[in-house]
Amino acid sequence: MIPISYIIRNIKKHKITSILTILGVTLVVFVFAGVLMLSNGLRATLVATGYDDNAVIIRKASQTEVQSIIPYDQAQLIVASPEIAPAKDNRPLYTNEIYVLINLPSRTDSTEANLVVRGITPKSFELRPNVKLIAGRLPQEAGSEIITGESASERFVGCGLGERVRFGAREWTVVGIFDAAGTGFDSEIWGDITQMSDAFRRPVYSSITFRMADTSQFTGMKDRLENDRRLTIEVFREKEYYANQSRTITTFINITGTVISIVFSLGAIVGAMITMYSAVANRTKEIGILRALGFKRLSILLVFFLESIFISLTGGMLGVLIAYFLRFIRISTTNWDTFSEIAFNFEISSQIAILAILFAVIMGIAGGFLPAVRASRLKIVDSLRSA
């Protein structure tokens, strides 16, 4: 078997072509990993918005809170369920909320985007312990006051602490900023449900969220409530509910990104082929000497094959390394399921890193196979005759 040091020496010998191929693979892997990180970040943000022991109820077939309407009489039947855990005051731990979309201009370019306004109750915070007030105070029940998520306060005009914003035929004062630990709530405006219901003339709820006393009873509770003829609702685990909201856009991102990555990878594969064919042409005499020394065709094939894989693997690791720094970038987009603006970070995982490097190796295999076969088939006499 030809030693690995021979492969490394040859890569160093042909620095320019090797570096160009490595950079091509790096770019492709960077794009591929970036797309996966983008969809993973969106999914992670929405999934983290929910809790394992919380359940969400919306109107049957509405899919999201945007279309959901739960009348007051149905809400009273739901919150009387024995499966609801007690709150700190020993009353059932649930919150009735309304969910409305408004348009506000961005601070950066003044373009308008949809923003969620959520009417909440005091128990909304107890149900979501990751939401913490970091500045100001909570809104009073009797005033036109709101609190905004940290991301919303930074991105939208009128949403900063002490600023005023107009919606729902009223002018509202921002009296507090809350941090939702990077979840979807960071892109929302919260206010007292009574004030919000009055401002938007919504004598109904959009959703009901409650803490389950025993999560193992979820299936039985779900069947009982959904089969109650007095109710027209669907019951979800909160994490499942928010995970479902990411499916449309993450599927689109993954498909589009995969197509782009495949197109780019074809260029990288061609580059790898050119590099390896050039290596075969420049080392014809060396190949003849190796064959004369007794090395078999398989050994020659493996040398060039492994060289191509090594180059692509190097590019793959560099691509993943550069893509890692995307996690410090925060972007916003429209969630196509809720039509609202949501901010999130690129999120890397060990699975994404492995897939990206595997993708690089596949490019190396595809680009190095034919040149390796070409090298292994060279005849000893013809190789030694070449200059």
Image (cartoon, rainbow, N blue to C red):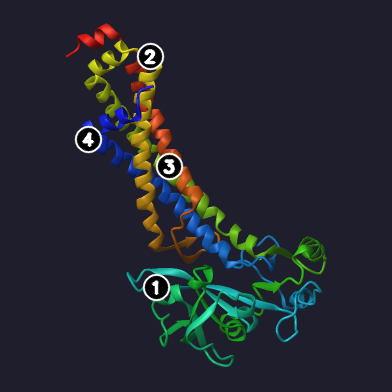
**Side (left or right) of 89 relative to 26:** right
Q: Residues within 10 Å of mark 3 (few under 14, many from 20)?
A: many
* Mark closest to the chain's N terminus, 2 or 4: 4
**Side (left or right) of 254 relative to 369:** right
Front residue of 48/305: it is 305
What SS does tag 2 mark?
loop
Residue designated by label 3: 357
* Nearer to us: label 4 or label 3: 4
* Nearer to us: label 2 or label 4: 2
Q: Residues within 10 Å of mark 2 (few under 14, many from 20)?
A: some
Gap in angstroms between the C-alphas marked 1 and 2: 65 Å
**What numbered label is drawn on residue 334?**
none
- Tell me which residue sits at (68%, 63%) in the image: 237
Gap in angstroms between the C-alphas marked 2 and 3: 30 Å
- Rendered position, 231 above or below 124: above
Residue designated by label 4: 15
* Nearer to us: label 2 or label 3: 2
Q: Are marks 1 and 2 in contact (CB under 8 Å)?
A: no
- Tell me which residue sits at (37%, 51%) in the image: 321
Q: Amino acid at mark 1?
A: Arg
